[in-house]
Image (tube, grey):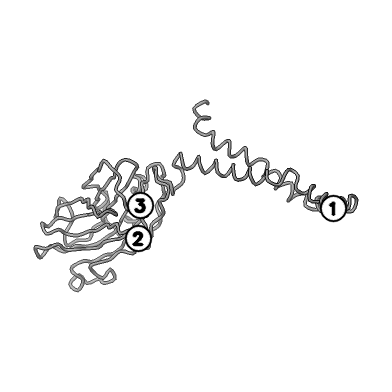
Amino acid sequence: MRSWLLQYWKLLAGAVALIWPAKDAILSILDWRGRYDAAIQTYHDLGGWPAVIGLILSPPPWFPMLAALVGVGMILWHFKIRGIMAQTLNQDKDAKNGSTNALPRPESIVKENLPGLSLHTVLRLPAPSGSSRFPIMDWKTNRNAVAAFYISASNRFTFAVTDTYGETYSLELPLGTDGIPINRRFYLMAEIGISGRSTEIRIGVDGKVLAERTLPFSVDLGDRQWRRPHFNFDPLKRDPSMNNGIVMDEIGYWSFSLTERSWAELKRDYYQKKFDFQIA
């Protein structure tokens, strides 16, 4: 019981502070005619507006507003400290939802979601044909943080994140059966999640995480207001021979990482059903 009170005392204090303004509001709504009649009668009996104002504004006029502000403030404080509100994800006060294209928004389990970026797409990539970097797509924020996907000159699929200071952190996978499939459609998941003390980067293929990297510090992505992605191909074209060898069937992204449960539900309830291929 004591631990429960220590955990929720701010929520309880805020709720108690709201009792008085809530009571006054309910009474005012239910007894508006009585208040009106009493005000008119008092006005005529006592003569003048001071008595009417005194009757209506009892308790003192500052008390309900102050109590309401204190109550709302305590409740919001509780939610921020506990990390229950979706926009205060794991020690971050301003995480906001990213945009999606056709995908349903997954269920959020707030205590595990991290602000950052979560990309989910179904696409087909060509075999590399040259010795230079082959860009696929990238995102930028309003403060010029960048999340980019490309095939490197050494023929590795690369997810690179550049922070607001111009520093880049990357995660790579080989091309082929042990990494990123070539010349077949597959489901790609790539995420960066930022907590107060570390940064998680991971890549998944067909529902299975194949590469992960943990940085012992928080990468600064600024406001994480990701603009529309820039593609090195036309996402609407279906003929790979006219589209740099790339075909994309679906893409969605959010400005926070998904929990394992949310990702499992997204894989099972959306990608596996819509695209009818086996997902881990």
Label disc, if present, on residue 266 of the rendered structure: 3
From this view, report whether residue 53 is shown above or below residue 144: above
**What whole-number distance in Å separates the C-alpha atoms at marks 2 and 3?**
28 Å
Quarter holding residue 60: top right
Disc 2: CA contacts within 10 A as few (<14), some (14-19) or many (>=20):
some
Q: Is residue 133 left or right of residue 113?
A: left
Q: Mark 2 is on which residue type?
A: Asn
Residue at 26% x, 61% y: name it: 138
Q: Mark 1 is on which residue type?
A: Asp
**What whole-number distance in Å separates the C-alpha atoms at marks 1 and 3?**
60 Å
Residue at 22% x, 50% y: name it: 169
Q: Earlier in the sequence, mark 1 or mark 3?
A: 1
Q: Is residue 49 left or right of residue 29?
A: right
Is residue 274 among the parts visible in the rendering?
Answer: no
Q: Mark 3 is on which residue type?
A: Leu
Residue tagged by mark 2? 142
Q: Which residue in the rendered view is the most extreme toward the bottom?
A: 242
Q: Earlier in the sequence, mark 1 or mark 2?
A: 1
Q: Position of residue 231 (x, y in %)?
A: 26, 66
